[in-house]
Structures are given as structure tokens and as C-alpha cells.
Image (cartoon, rainbow, N blue to C red):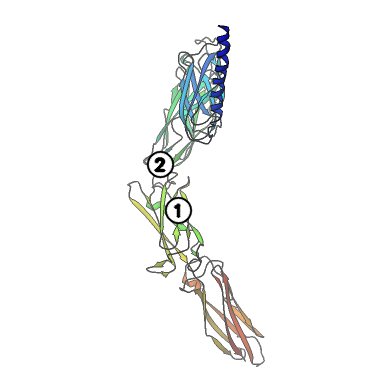
Amino acid sequence: MKKLILTIIPVLLIITGCKKSDSSSNPVDPSGKGEVTVAGQVVDFNSGSGVSNAAINVRAKDSRDSSINLSTYTDANGYYSLKFEISSGKDLVVIALKEGYLGDTTEVFATAGRTVEASQLKVKNIATNTNSKRYPAAIYLVTTSLPKIGIRGSGDIEQLMLEFEVVDSSGIPLNLVNAVDVLFSVASNPGGGLSVTPLTVKTDAAGRVSCVLTSGTRAGSVQILAKVIRTSDTLSSLPVAVSIHGGLPDLAHFSLYPTLLNIAGWDIFGNSTDLNVLVGDKYANPVRTGTSVYFTTTGGIIEGSVRTSELGTGSVPIISGYPRPVHPVFGNGFATITATTANENQATISRECLVLFSGTPVMSVIPTSFDIPNGGGQSFSYLVSDQNGNPLTGGTSIKVSVEGDNIKLSGDTDVELPDTQSPAWTQFSFFLFDNDTSATLRNVAVKISTTGDNGKGSLSITGRVR
């Protein structure tokens, strides 16, 4: 018999070793998404026996992360298990609480596809007489039913519940014998008819109270406070921030505009600018985050859609290329960009704007020659545009210079173009006059030059001054 036992033991060791090796050879990607189970046991600190009906709370260790906040209770033997979705590996905190016991906390690292066994939670029975008088020492937020809500009439959920817990100086929740009134108030309020109900409520057998926040017609951040009036002072919770986002798009609050009105895109492909949207609801709040806006263009190509930010904004690039745009009214070079979304009635609403694809520089001047008498002068009109008669891009430099003695220039001789689509920025003038009192015949040359994103160009004319 002894020989048989000795033979079996190595086999068991081999099997156990194989199982362990198999687990380590199949690591789980901590960035994966899926289900995780957190399980464990709550025991009495002194006896080691399981503690039934202990409250278990599992939340993210990072207090800024509200994506995980779950609760359950232990069974008759002190065991608990929580299964939930997780988007990536997270450090979690597991808390055990029960009336008449000092609570305990442990930490686990959870990844998708695993059952995580938390270390044993040991709660200590403090042998408190539940009928003795205990006093409130702190108020904590236990849970919120939702991370955010929508404004009234947005089509989204308009209410959420906040649950608080009042504990004594030992961290034990107050029972019914020691119940207190908790007052709820709004510390920061965007207005618009927002409300909190009830305003006052008495703690239950677990020391807990709850209130319901109902949104109004304005978006923004709300802060809720829970207070207990004590004999000598007021006990307050930390402010609880709740986000209220906007409603659905409204045409009267829907804007579309380009970052640049004019790009060098008729002859040069690959140049770009951004098309920007600003989308609000009927109350002038930014629409809910992630509202989709779609784009089309009659020239070049454009990114097809964008989801709005918390401020109701979004941007997509338009890139010059085929087809070259032709507008039915303004002609060659003008691309029509259309942005569309849907309003609260599921109807399509849209806005349009223009982006000019300007080409290479074209220049002309009138007159093309001159003969200025002694002490006289001559006015000139000149045109600087692209081949379609449209203005060049913003930042383009236009200069007029003269070669000759005792000759002066005035007028539009040093111009920097703004970002514009207006043909008014294609027409310019200057004045050339003789600044010599002696009647001396001289040859004079005038040069008009331009430099910018559209390219370089120049035009020269000659004449005489007597």
C-alpha cells in the first residue's frame, strides 16, 4: 500500500504542474474587452467564519473613473461573485461593509475573460449595541444610476438617482434607531428648471438615502450636496458632479464655416483647409456629445462625417483635387460644401458654405505705356487675379516698383491680400509722377510683381518722363 501511494504522488504533481504551465502559456491581453468575474469571501475577523449579507462594492481604483461601480451581497457562507463587462485591464477596489462590523478593503487587477479571486475580506465585529445612540460623522456617495443625462425634451434619459450613506465615527452606517434627516441641495446649477427631489429624506436601516435629479432646459455641470444638520454644525458630503448634455440639432443653431475662404487649389492638388461645424439644440445648448454631421463637396474631396465634441463642435478637412469646382452663379473655382444632420423630428437639416479654389497669378495694367510731361503724372489701374478672375490666397504679396530718376509712386504699391473670395481684391491702382523740376527726357520702367501660395508672377511696362 505504501508503494502505491508513492507511485500516485508524482503523477498528481505532474498533472498539477501541467495545468499551471498551460495557464501561463495562454496570457490574456490586458487591453482586451469582455466579461470579468470578481469573486471572494467575507469572513469574521475573529472566528474566520463566513459573514452573510455583507454589502460588497466593486469600483475602479482611479476615483476619476466612474465606468465601474457595482454592488452585491454575500450569501449565507460569506461568498460573493460579480460578473460585468470591462473594456481594458483595470485596478479595482473591493469593499466589504456590514452593520456592526468594521469594514475591509482589498484590491485586484481585472482583465477580460478571467475570474479574479480577491483576497479574503475580514470584517471585525465591534460588538456595538445597535440600540445605543450613534451620531453621523461622514456622508459618502455610494452610487449613481447614470454617469450623465440629457436636457428636457432631448429624447435622452432626463433623470438619475444618487444614493448616499451616512456613517458614524467608526465608519459604520447608521441604523434605524440612529436615523437622521439628510437635506439635498444644488451647489452649482446651470438653471433651466433643474430640480432635486425629495429635498429631505430620513436614512434607512442601512444608513442610506437617495434623491432624484431631473434635468431642465440647459446643459452644463451640476453639483449636488447631501447635508446633515448636527447640534453644533452642518455635516456635508463632497460635491457630486453630474453632466447634463444638450438635445438634438436645431437649424437655427447650426453653423458651417471654413477655416480658410480661399486655398490655392485650382491648379495645385493636395492643398487643404478645415470645414467646421457648430451645432446647438433649440435652447442654444451644445448638442449631445457624439452627434453625427455629414459632409459633401462639389470640388476636391472631403472627409465624410464627424461626431461633435462636448461643445457641439467638429471639423473635417477638404482637399483640393478633381473635380475642379464650378459654381452655377460664381463660376469656376467655387466649391459648395454641404453639412447635414437630423433634428428632433428626424428631419434632415443642412447648411452650405463656399471655399474658393484659386489658380495661378494673372496680371494686367492700363495704360500699358506712358509719356509724362515735366512735373506731370499718370494714373494706372491694374488687375491681379487667377485665370478665373478670382482673388489669390490670403498672405499674397503684391508690389509695384519703378526704375528711373526723380520718379515717385503712390497708391496700391505694397499690398498683402487678406483671406478673401471678393473680386474687389483683384483691382488696384497707383499713380506715377515726375518729381524733377528740370525738363529732362528719361526712360522709366514700372514692374508689378506678386508672390504667394498660388505662385509668382510679374508684369513690366515702360514709358518716358520729360
In this view, which residue lies farthest toward the top?
Answer: 1
Image quarter in which the C terminus is found: bottom right
Tell me the residue at 40%/41% (across/down): 217
Please, what secondary structure does the residue beneath circle 1 have?
strand
Q: Are marks 1 and 2 in contact (CB under 8 Å)?
A: no
Does 336 appear above or below 50?
below
* Res 397 visible: no
Q: Nearer the viewer, residue 30 or 376?
A: 30
CA–CA distance in space, label 1 to label 2: 22 Å
Does 2 appear above or below 207?
above
Residue at numbered disc 2? 217
Please, what secondary structure does the residue beneath circle 2 have?
loop
Q: Nearer the viewer, mark 1 or mark 2?
A: 1
Image quarter in which the N terminus is found: top right
* Res 335 visible: yes
Tell me the residue at 44%/45% (across/down): 290
Q: Amino acid at mark 1?
A: Val
Residue at numbered disc 1? 277
Tag 2 or tag 1, which sits nearer the N-term?
2
Residue 38 position, x and y percent, is 50, 25
Residue 202 position, x and y percent, is 45, 21
Q: Name which quarter of the figure residue 153 lies in.
A: top left
Q: Amino acid at mark 2?
A: Thr
Q: Name which quarter of the figure residue 7 lies in.
A: top right
Residue 307 falls left or right of residue 379 = left
Does 387 appear above or below 316?
below
